[in-house]
């Protein structure tokens, strides 16, 4: 759901993640986490979000190599700058 320039993702009726509409790194982080937690398949991400399969694979490779910090996203667990 997009509202006021922010994108929100829901699980049922509960919001689980929100980011700025143009924040591609947060999108890649969130979708990588969904895949790595076994919630979705790569093909689901490609179909639902209209992204290329190679972009999904690159994001997963970055997450596996550098973790959430590889996406340059601040305010994650353990980050004192929240």
Image (cartoon, grey):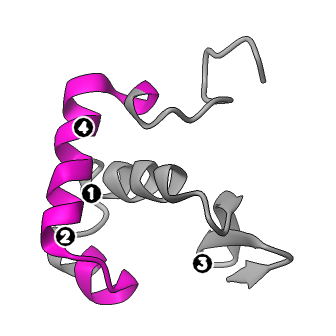
Task: State the residue in front, 69 or 43.
Answer: 69
Q: Are marks 1 and 2 in contact (CB under 8 Å)?
A: yes
Q: Which mark is residue 62?
A: 4
- Label 1 environment density (alpha carbons within 10 Å; few <14, some 14–19, many ≥20): some
Q: Earlier in the sequence, mark 1 or mark 4?
A: 1
Q: Secondary structure at mark 4?
A: helix
In this figure, which residue is indicated by the disc labeled 3? 12
Residue 77, placed above or below residue 28: above
Q: CA distance from mark 1 to mark 3?
A: 18 Å
Q: Which mark is residue 20?
A: none
Instruction: Residue 63: give x, y in percent of width and height.
Output: 28, 37
Instruction: Residue 53: give x, y in percent of width and height.
Output: 15, 72
In this figure, which residue is indicated by the disc labeled 2? 41
Instruction: Residue 68: give x, y in percent of width and height.
Output: 42, 32
- Residue at the location (66% across, 69% down)? 21
* 70 is within the stretch colored magenta: no
The magenta region covers: 45-69
Residue 69, placed above or below residue 29: above
Q: CA distance from mark 1 to mark 4?
A: 13 Å
- Label 4 environment density (alpha carbons within 10 Å; few <14, some 14–19, many ≥20): some
Q: Earlier in the sequence, mark 1 or mark 2?
A: 1
- Residue at the location (26% across, 88% down)? 47
Query: On the image, which quarter does residue 23 sit in?
Result: bottom right
Q: Is residue 4 left or right of residue 52?
A: right
């Amino acid at each position: 759901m997009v509202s006021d320039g922010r994108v929100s993702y829901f699980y049922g009726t509960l919001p689980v993640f929100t980011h700025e509409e143009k924040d591609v790194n947060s999108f890649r982080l969130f979708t990588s986490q969904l895949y790595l937690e076994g919630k979705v398949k790569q093909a689901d991400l490609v179909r639902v979000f209209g992204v290329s399969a190679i972009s999904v694979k690159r994001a997963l490779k970055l997450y596996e190599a550098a973790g959430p910090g590889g996406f340059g996203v601040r305010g994650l667990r353990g980050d004192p700058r929240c």
